[in-house]
Image (cartoon, grey):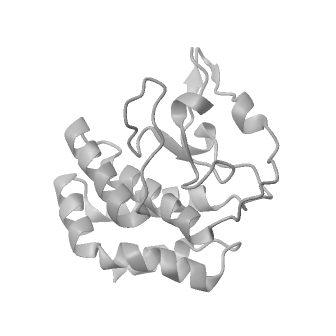
């Protein structure tokens, strides 16, 4: 019940109530498994819920097609060599796409991203991998992009970007410049 309240508070102004309901239904259906993973993360429930709410607000705030996507700086005060992270990729204005924007899939990606980071932000690699697999399989239902080295990415290697092809995820390595 408390998780549902957090989801309702996070609803973005740009998406319809029906789309938000469809996207969050899948998360609520998974509550027993999410609770098990939350317990494995050894993080207090209130802390996990607060992180989830804040991350979900951040990743769903930009209006797809109208506002720039979330940046690494929005998520964390990241710096490279002492200066703020700047990305020419994120500075590119949005391109009009011939493909139809899938709001529910985009919201699913946002939910999976926020859930994985809320539960696994401080977790060790084996738990992060388990959380990523769970969120991809059960929340998004889609696979992730590959990293430049050809290995599979996890939700901890990607960022939500409405300009990317479905499932609307890009790798951090394609956004954050190398030092």
Tell me which corner region of the image, top left, top right, bottom left or bottom right, holds residue 151.
top left
Percent of width and height locating residue 152: 37, 37
Which residue is nearer to you in this view: 119 or 16?
16
Q: Quadrant of the C terminus?
A: top right
* x 38%, y 42%: residue: 154
Which residue, as the protein is rendered here, is positioned at the far front? 98
Residue 22: x and y in percent read 50, 80
Q: Is residue 90 above or below residue 101?
A: above
Left or right: residue 18 versus residue 125 is right
Q: Is residue 93 visible?
A: yes
| Frontmost residue, 78 versus 174 | 174
Which picture quadrant has residue 66?
A: bottom right
Front position in the image: 85 or 137: 137
Is the residue 46 above or below the residue 26 in the image? above
Q: Is residue 96 left or right of residue 4?
A: right
How many circles with numbers are drawn on the protein?
Answer: 0
Give the image location of residue 32, x and y in percent.
Answer: 21, 74
Residue 47 can be seen in this image: no
Provide residue 10's location: percent of width, then percent of height: 55, 71
Residue at (64%, 48%) from the top-left corner? 164
Q: Quadrant of the N terminus?
A: bottom left
Give the residue displayed 39% in from the left and 75% down from the top.
Answer: 26
């Amino acid at each position: 019940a408390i998780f549902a309240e957090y989801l309702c508070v996070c609803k973005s102004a740009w998406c319809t109530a029906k789309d938000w309901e469809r996207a969050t239904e899948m998360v609520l259906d998974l509550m027993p498994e999410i609770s098990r993973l939350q317990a494995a993360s050894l993080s207090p429930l209130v802390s996990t819920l607060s992180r989830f709410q804040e991350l979900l607000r951040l990743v769903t705030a930009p209006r797809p097609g109208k506002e720039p996507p979330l940046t690494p700086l929005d998520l964390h005060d990241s710096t490279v060599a002492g200066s703020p992270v700047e990305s020419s990729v994120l500075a590119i204005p949005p391109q009009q796409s011939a493909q139809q924007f899938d709001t529910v899939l985009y919201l699913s990606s946002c939910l999976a991203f926020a859930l994985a980071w809320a539960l696994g932000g401080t977790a060790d690699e084996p738990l992060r991998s388990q959380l990523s697999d769970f969120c991809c399989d059960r929340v998004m239902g889609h696979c992730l992009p590959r990293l430049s080295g050809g290995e599979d990415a996890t939700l901890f290697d990607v960022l939500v970007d409405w300009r990317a092809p479905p499932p609307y995820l890009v790798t951090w390595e394609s956004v954050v410049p190398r030092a």
